[in-house]
């Protein structure tokens, strides 16, 4: 999963299998698309050791945007 952050792009990887394919639900629970590991977005960021490097508020916004895209067409508002 790539997050677009001004000036840098950060790729989050699954701490279990190094996959970069994730989906996120409305509770900000991230599910790995490869091994189905579930963890909270903040935990994933922590596991990737990027918490100090990034503005987590920006990530939350970025994920919220992705989430809207995921739920688009499914009656999500
Ligand atoms: Zn995984």
Image (cartoon, grey):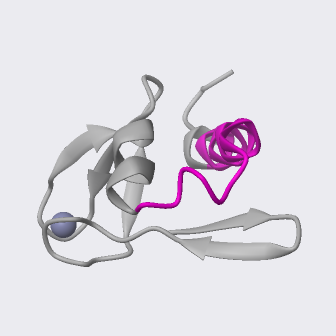
Residue 43 appears at what percent x and percent y? 34, 41
Marker count (numbered):
0
Q: Which residues are magenta?
A: 49-69
Corner quadrant of residue 56: top right
Quadrant field for ligand 1: bottom left
From the viewer's perspective, is 31 left or right of 49? left
* 34, 77: nearer the viewer: 34
Is residue 32 inside the magenta stretch? no
Residue located at (38% from left, 60% from top)? 22
**Residue 54 vs residue 25: left or right?**
right
- Seen from the viewer's position, the closer of residues 52 and 28 is 52
Residue occupying image coordinates x 55% and y 35%: 74
Seen in the image, is 12 located left or right of residue 52? left
Outermost residue on the front side: it is 52
**22 or 10: nearer the eye?**
10
Image quarter of residue 24 = top left
**Compared to 62, does 34 lie above or below?**
below
Can you name the residue that lies furthest to the right here? Answer: 6
Q: Is residue 18 above or below residue 70?
A: below
Name above or below for residue 28 compared with residue 13: above
Query: Magenta segment, principal secondary structure?
Result: helix
The picture places residue 59, in percent across and down from the top left corner, at 67, 47
Q: Position of residue 3 (x, y in %)?
A: 65, 64
Quadrant the C terminus occupies: top right
**What's the residue at 15%, 52% (across, down)?**
37
- Residue in the picture at 38% in, 75% down: 20
């Amino acid at each position: 999963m790539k997050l677009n952050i001004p000036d840098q792009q950060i790729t989050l990887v699954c701490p279990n299998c190094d996959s970069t394919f994730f989906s996120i639900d409305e509770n900000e629970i991230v599910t790995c698309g490869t091994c189905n590991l579930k963890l909270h977005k903040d935990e994933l960021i922590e596991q990737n050791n990027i918490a100090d490097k990034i503005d987590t508020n920006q990530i939350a916004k970025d994920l919220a945007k992705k989430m809207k895209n995921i739920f688009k067409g499914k009656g999500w508002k």
